[in-house]
Image (tube, rainbow, N blue to C red):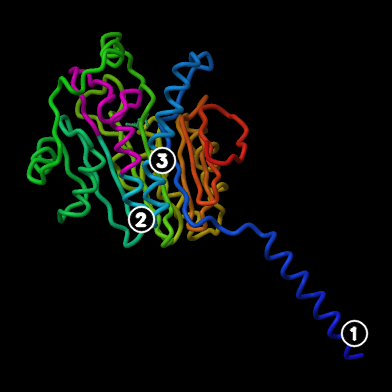
Amino acid sequence: MAKSIIKKTGFVLLLFLIVSCAKEKPPRYVIVIHGGAGAISADLPDSVKQAYISGLNEALSAGEKILQKGGKSIDAVEAAIRVMEDNPLFNAGKGSVYTYEGKVSMDASIMDGQGSKAGAVAGVEDVRHPISLARMVMDSSEYVFLSGRGASEFARTHQLETADSTYFFTPGRWEEHLRKLREGKLGTVGCVALDQQGNLAAGTSTGGLTNKRWGRIGDTPVIGAGTYASNKSCAVSCTGVGEYFIRFVVAHSIADMIEYKGWTLRQAANFVINEQLKRAGGEGGLIAVDRNGNIAMIYNTKGMFRAYAKSNGERWTGIFAEKIKRSAKP
Ligand code: ASP
């Protein structure tokens, strides 16, 4: 009798061990980035595709390096976005599109899910890294949101690198401006991350829409619309036609659905992008990570430049609806 009880208990223990080993452990860290969503042509020449892919990979690695060493998600977000702000392929920093007046006018925001701290800037014309300016607003000012001349003055006070209009001249963007394209050129950049301490962070940076007028500001620097992070739920960075993302307060809505309705990250992101926004005619997408390391990369456009990496070695980069193949590091 006693023997059989011991046998049964042993069997149950073994079963428990097998089940708990099979259950995937949450990753220790996760980083996801985007380089804009929109009508990306399927005929994009291979060389251009490759250039985007390597631009994304470079940014991803800059952020991942920080997370690997146990660094903070907010630092990883800033580092990854700075790399994309220096890459003229993306519509942020150096590669920003031109306004109706032929100038750059950049917006950026960053949010730390630990303590709900945030910083944002809008209409900045002369700062090399708007994401770092947003970070500086968060860390070293009593405000959350600065704009225009005042934001530049704040950058100078804090010795952030400034740049004149020659730095922001890129022939391709100028050509778009001359052709008076109204719709946004793709390439807004964003990053979300979960670090080894369990803290979430999100950031987004953009030149906005091509030929925008009258000081137009999109969703990118609006906390809760284009960017949001809370350790209680998730971190989100959006891209697309900003007016819709502001009207539907996209990033914050997703966090609320998770925190108050118990939805999964994917359910919430999918609902907002593919139902709410789509019904209203809003085009775009988002990247997000929740506190358990689940990710979402959802868009209702032809494509979205995007990539992610996890502590377990999973790494992926893509543009269109490619099947995600889990691969080891390239
Ligand atoms: N959301 C950005 C804006 O409206 C543009 C974009 O993501 O392409 O300014």
Does the beta carbon at disc 1 come under 8 Å from ligand 1?
A: no
x 74%, y 65%: residue = 18
Q: Which label is found at residue 228? A: none
At a point 76% along the width and 75% down the height, the residue shown is 13
Q: Is residue 256 left or right of residue 207?
A: right
How far from the left and from the top, in percent, is residue 249?
A: 39, 44
Tag 3 residue:
61
Going by the numbered disc 2, the residue's amino acid type is Gly
Residue at which label 1 appears:
4
- The amino acid beneath tag 3 is Ser
Judged from the image, the secondary structure of the residue bearing numbered disc 1 is helix
Residue placed farthest to the right in the image?
A: 1
In the image, 21 versus 272, the foreground residue is: 21
Q: CA distance from mark 3 to mark 1?
A: 55 Å
Answer left or right for 221 relative to 263. left
Q: SS at mark 2?
A: loop
> In the image, is the residue at mark 3 within 8 Å of ligand 1 by its beta carbon?
no
Say whether mark 2 is within 8 Å of ligand 1. Answer: no
The residue stretch that appears in magenta: 79-106
Return the residue nearer the eye: 276 or 119: 119
Q: Which residue is mark 2?
A: 71
Q: Amino acid at mark 1?
A: Ser
